[in-house]
Structure formats: structure tokens, C-alpha cells
Amino acid sequence: MSTTRKRVYGYLAEFKSASALYKAAEQVRDAGFRKWDCYTPYPVHGLDAAMGLKRSILPWFVFFGGMTGTATAFALAYVTQVVIYPTVVQAKPTNIFTIPAFFPVMFELTILFSGFTVLFGLLGLMQLPRLNHPLFASKQIHRATDDGFFIAIEARDAKFSPNGTHDLLAEIGGENIELVEEED
Amino acid sequence: MAANTETAPHQNTGVKLPVLKREKLIINDRSYHWITDRICGIIENKQPFLWWLLFLPSALIALIGVGGGLLHLVSTGVGVWGNTNRVMWGWPIVNFVFWIGIGHAGTLISAILFLTRQNWRTSINRAAEAMTIFAVMCAGIFPAFHVGRVWFAWFLAPIPNANAIWQNFKSPLLWDVFAVSTYFTISLIFWYLGMVPDLATIRDRCKPGIRKFLYGIFAMGWRGGNRQWSHYEMAYLLLAALATPLVLSVHSVVSFDFATSVVPGWHTTIFPPYFVAGAIFGGFAMVLTIMIPARFIYGLQDMITMKHIDNMAKIILLTGTIVGYAYLMELFVAFYSGAIYEMEAFKYRITGPYWWAYACMMTCNVLSPQIFWFKYCRENLWIVMIVAMFVNVGMWFERFVIIVTTLARMWLPGDWKTFSPSPEDQMLFVGTIGMFLMLFLLFLRFLPCINIAEVKWAKLESDPHFDDIESHPDEGAREIAAYQQELTENKG
């Protein structure tokens, strides 16, 4: 007879509304947990503060991505129009003073590079795409994309304890508390 | 006065003032689950007969018009088009500007209305963004084939080639290449990222199988955790901030194709703002044209309410009036400049052989939206639909007037020639209309046509302080109340 070993991912608890989730999140934060998350069908504004999350660092990536775009466009236009192939067209000079004519392309590439940085920076920060996640083993997590509000506390958090965490979630108003296990 | 304003919030603590009621964006108190069910139901259930009735002809027209039309064009040569020497831009560029303009309303709704916190955008932004992408796809066909030998279209890209010639970065035509391709790419990223949470919703509702797998791939493993939402919302804000100047730049750059030339009738500084206003005007008309039937067919009246339609009608009225102002200002400046060629160009537009196109443009774009001053007309869907159709037609004629009447009458009398489109021209244009409708119907069939997550967010009880509003008063609302109090005190 074979047995399947299972690895505990953590506890998942449902809360009945966004308000209830918000208050519960403040308490989980104050209890000192680090590896936990709130799952909601839409972005609940203010939950970042209730969870103690910092502002996303994405804008910094995008700033440098955008600047790369500006520099790329300028280099592309300057090198081809002034250095390699200086041609007088529309009576415009072939030196650095041609730069106003390069502005539209510089602007467009700034936006284009920023846009790609948003896309790939976001995927990196969210650690997506991924094909599966231990949480998907839960029977109720699919409701997080419909009408459910959940908190999941991971077992790898230092403060996690099988009974203590369960009791905490029950105390702050969690319902349908479930131990999520993934097959090892 | 300044001191008054600073102390005002403290003076007015505890004073209850009447606050104007806002109309709800989601009516009939629908639950989150109802919203999910109704939007995902469109994808999960069998399509209504009307969908097939629209889809099959559209697909057929697209196949014959775009597929067959382009095959004939490429195998024979662009000579089959009606373009003549002088009117060398002809229909293809008219159609290009028409389609690219349509796209602008989508970006306006998704980006500019997001930055200005217009929450009513949530119900219509997804479909409008889809419309943007399909319109830009239709637009792209025309300049790509208008270059003559489409297999050399890659010459537009600034890459080293065997001729050792580089693109002219001083030319508005090259700016256009960058503007339009950037616009398409950013619109696609915006649309797709906005859809990821909703694709996850559909994934979670699917039974295991090929559908679940495919939606799962495109949802990229989205879980809806707040650690994801936090970055996601920042990304959405950044994309909106990037797309806002982008959308204004795209039609400005398109207008540079005209404005930087020294052609009478084109060489005007009013062109960039006038083109942008016209693009938003035409785009909103197209949003109404496709959303009113979709709303009816799929029963989305609780999410796309009369309030949304009313708002869009008002934007059409506003932008239509701006466009009317631009038309009149163009005439005035032509008169005031004293330049005989400029005056002659406009006289030819109004009284020449193309007078009917000019009259059509004026009637459809300037006069027809004016009926939206009346509430009754904004509330009657038939009237809204008819005006939207008028605007679609009028905006096409605007581009026809600008391009064809100007090129038909350039500097040298020896160049003067009137233009008439060939059957191939007409076939391709009708084909792109079919292609646009076909793509939009496929979008309705396979993707969530309303932003599920954002619509849920727009409900009042989605605010985490909905239960304890007293202990978390809205700062903004308090300031407004204090200001109103101050006004009444000053009056007294």
C-alpha cells in the first residue's frame, strides 16, 4: 500500500466582505506575520496599508526603461542622420541642431520602452507566469476570482503554528478555515 | 481668504450638509456573483442567433474584401486603385486616417478617464480597448499596401540594409511609422494586462479540459493576491499615464503628415488639436455603434446603464462642437491670412465638384450631434444610434475632404484632376469594415467584454470602509462640504 506524502502550504480562511477582510488583515499584520496574502476578486483600495505593504517599486524600473528608450531613439536618429549618412532633406541641417526633428521618434520610443518595462517588470514582481501554485489545491480558492475574500497564511512563516494560526484566523472572523496541502 | 480656507475644515466639524447624489454605476444591486455570471455567461453559453447573423456576413465580407482584395492588389499592382498622379494618397490614406482615429476613443476611455477618476469607464473600457486594437489593425493595412510593393514594407524599419540608405528621421511619414506601431503595441499591452484577472475568473469557472488550459495559459497563473494587485494597480496606473500622452501624440503625428507640407489647406497649426478632437469624436460614435447592440443582445443593461450612454453622448456633443469650431476657424484663418491660394483651396472645397462631401461632413459632424443638447435625444437609443451612424459617416467624409479635395487642386493647373475610387478601393474599404466587425464579434465570443474586476470594484460596498464610514470619513467629501459651507457663509 502506498501513501502520498503531502506538504502543508498553509491556512486559508474566508471573510464575508471587503470590510471584514480589511480589519482581519490589520490584525494579521499586527500579529507579525510575513508570508501571507489577501485574495480578493478586485483590488481593495487601502488593503496595502492594512497589510503593511510598501509602495510598488515598479515606477523606478519604468523610469530607467523610458530613459533607455529616449537614448536609443536619439542615438538611432543622430548616428544615422548626422554621422553615417548626412543628407540635407527639407533644408534641415545635418548636425546636432536637427534635434527638434528627432523629438517625435524619441517620444514614441520612450513610451514604447516604458510600456515593455511595465509589462516585464510587473511579471517579474508578481513572479508570474507560472503554471501552477500550491494554493490551487484548495477547494474554495477559485471563489477569490468571483466573490470570495480570503486570507492565506503560509506554513513557512516563522510565526506559523498548526493550532495557533488556526485559532487566530477563527478569532478575527475567518470562516471555512482550510488547511491547504500540496502533493509532494 | 487664504486663512479662511485653511481653517475651514475645523470650523465645520459636525455640520451635516446635503451632498449631491451620484447615480449608481451598477444598478439593481447586483451581487459580485451575478456580475461574474452575466459576463462569463456570454462566453460559456451558446451564442444567440443574432451573433451568427452578424458574424457570418462580416466574416464573408472580410474574406472577400480584405483577403481577396489584397490578393488581387498584390498580384496585379497598386495601379488597380483609383489613385492618380496628384491624388496619389487617395482612398487608402483616407481609410487609414479614418480607422486610426476610431481607435482613439478606446484609449481615451481606458487611460484619460482612468487618470481623471471617471469611474463610469469601468463598464465600457474593455470593449473600447478591443475596438482600438481592431481599428488599428484595419488602419495598418492601408499604408502598408500603399507603399506600392508591400514586400518592401520592411524598408520602413530602421535596420541596416543592402542599399546602405537610412530612413529619414526628419520626415513625418517616419514619425508616423513609430507613432502607429508604438500605439498598437501599448494598446495591446494595456488591453491584455487589464484582462489577466478576468481571464483567471474564466479559468476558475471552466471544467478541466482544453478551455481551462488555454484560459489558464493566458491568465498566467493569476491568483488575485493583494501582493499581486498592489504591483498590478501600479502597472495599470503607469500604463494609463503612458498611454495618455501617447494617444494625443498619435493623431498629432498623423496630422503632421499634412501640416508640415506646404500645401494650401493642409499647412495649418490647428491640425494637431483638431485631428485629436475629431478622432475622439469619431471613436466615441463607434463605441456607441457597437456597444448599444451588444448591450441589448447580451442583456448588459445593469452594467452599461443609460448613465453611461448619456455620458458618451455628452462627449460626442463636446468634441463635435470642438470639431465644428476647428472647421470654422480653418475658414476664418484662410480668409484672414489673405493668402490667395489658401482662400482658393477652401473655396474649392465648399463650392467645387466635391461640395457634397463638404456638406455631408458639416451636416453629420457639426449639426447632427447638436441634438444631444436635449435630454430626450440622449435617452432615446434610436436617436443616439442614428447620430452615432451620422458621425461615423461624417468623420470618414472629413478625411476625404481633407485629402482628396486638397490633392485634386494643387499649385499647377496642369496637375488638376478629380478623383474617383475604383471598385478595388471600395472592396478593400468595405472589407475592413467586415474585418472590424468580425474581430469584434469574436472578441465578444471568447473574451470577457466587460472588465469584471473593475465593475465589482465600482460597487459601493466594495469600499473596505463601507461598514464604518463614520470612523473613516472621506477626506475629499469633507473638503467639499467645508467649501460649500464657506460659500454660504460668505453669501450671508
Image: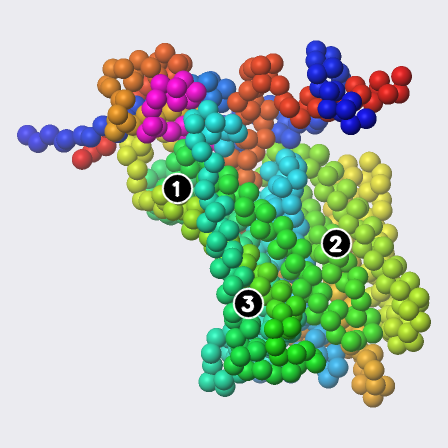
Residue at image coords 76%, 17%: B18
- Label 2 sits on a secondary structure element that is helix
Q: Within 10 angstroms of label 2, few (less than 14), some, or many (20 or more) residues?
A: many
For residue B400, side relative to residue B430 (left or right): right
Which amino acid, by three-letter code, is at mark 2? Ala
Q: Is residue A128 above or below residue B62?
A: above
Q: Which residue carries the number 1 mark?
A: A126
Residue B140 seen in render: no
Disc number placed over residue B233 in the picture, else none: none
Label total for image: 3
Residue at image coords 55%, 24%: B463
Q: Position of residue A153 (x, y in %)?
A: 32, 25
Residue at image coords 80%, 55%: B323
For residue B347, side relative to residue A22 (left or right): right
Q: Position of residue B139 (x, y in %)?
A: 62, 64
- Magenta-colored stretch includes residue A37: yes
Q: Is residue B60 above or below residue B217?
A: below
Q: Chain of mark 3?
A: A
Q: Which residue carries the number 2 mark?
A: B277
Residue B92 in which image quadrant = bottom right
Disc number placed over residue A74 in the picture, else none: 3
Q: Within 10 angstroms of label 1, few (less than 14), some, or many (20 or more) residues?
A: some
Q: Chain of mark 1?
A: A
- Label 1 sits on a secondary structure element that is helix
Residue A98 in which image quadrant = bottom right
Residue closest to the eye, B118 or A35? A35
Q: Are marks 1 and 2 in contact (CB under 8 Å)?
A: no
